[in-house]
Amino acid sequence: MDGHESYVSIEVAKLLKELKFDWEGKLCIDDKFYPGSEIKRWNNMDNIKSPENLTVVPTLYIAQKWLRDVQGIDITVSFCKHEFETGSGIEKAYFNECEKITEDGVIDYTDNEAYFHTYEEALENGIELAVNALIEEHNK
């Protein structure tokens, strides 16, 4: 995408939009990015209605911070050694832990079977797990 920042996928950004994500990101219209389309805060643009084909795509860091600060969900990515089923031996791997602390205790959204080759893949997966769980909770 852009520079050294890693962004969530457009699919995850659309899920964040369902949860009223209104922080900074790249502007995406009809699944296409436009140069110079960085916006700071969607809620500062109250006079503009959000059309269906418009999505704000945040960096992985911004999405993770929004989930922590606004939704109370902490996503942690850790390094481990894991032997992949491909038989290629022990390779570096990352996994995520995704938890929400509530008055009733801790809700664990972690997929204990998921391992990833990169930190960014593990973080995006944790963000997607959290967002899908929140959407499910809101739809109850």
Image (spheres, rainbow, N blue to C red):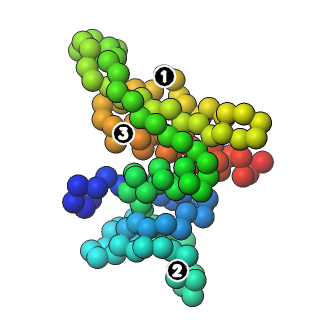
Q: Is residue 121 above or below residue 87?
A: below
Q: Are marks 1 and 3 in contact (CB under 8 Å)?
A: no
* Image side of residue 115 versus residue 133, left or right: left
Q: Amino acid at mark 1?
A: Glu
The residue that mark 2 highlights is 44
Assign a secondary structure to mark 1: loop
Can the viewer see residue 15? no
Q: Residues within 10 Å of mark 1 (few under 14, many from 20)?
A: few
Mark closest to the chain's N terminus, 3 or 2: 2
The residue that mark 1 highlights is 113
Q: Position of residue 135 (x, y in %)?
A: 65, 50
Mark closest to the chain's N terminus, 1 or 3: 1
Assign a secondary structure to mark 2: helix
The residue at 71%/41% (across/down) is: 102
Task: Say the numbered circle drawn on residue 33.
Answer: none
Mark 1–mark 2 distance (CA, rounded to whole Å): 40 Å
Q: Are marks 1 and 2 in contact (CB under 8 Å)?
A: no
The residue at 53%/28% (across/down) is: 111
Q: Amino acid at mark 2?
A: Asn
Q: Position of residue 32 (x, y in %)?
A: 35, 67
Mark 3–mark 2 distance (CA, rounded to whole Å): 31 Å
Q: Nearer the viewer, residue 51 or 46?
A: 46
Assign a secondary structure to mark 3: helix
Which marked residue is nearer to the observer: mark 3 or mark 2?
2
Q: Is residue 93 above or below residue 127?
A: above
Looking at the image, the residue that sits furthest to the bottom is: 47
The residue at 40%/52% (across/down) is: 61
Q: Nearer the viewer, residue 132 or 42?
A: 42
The residue that mark 3 highlights is 121
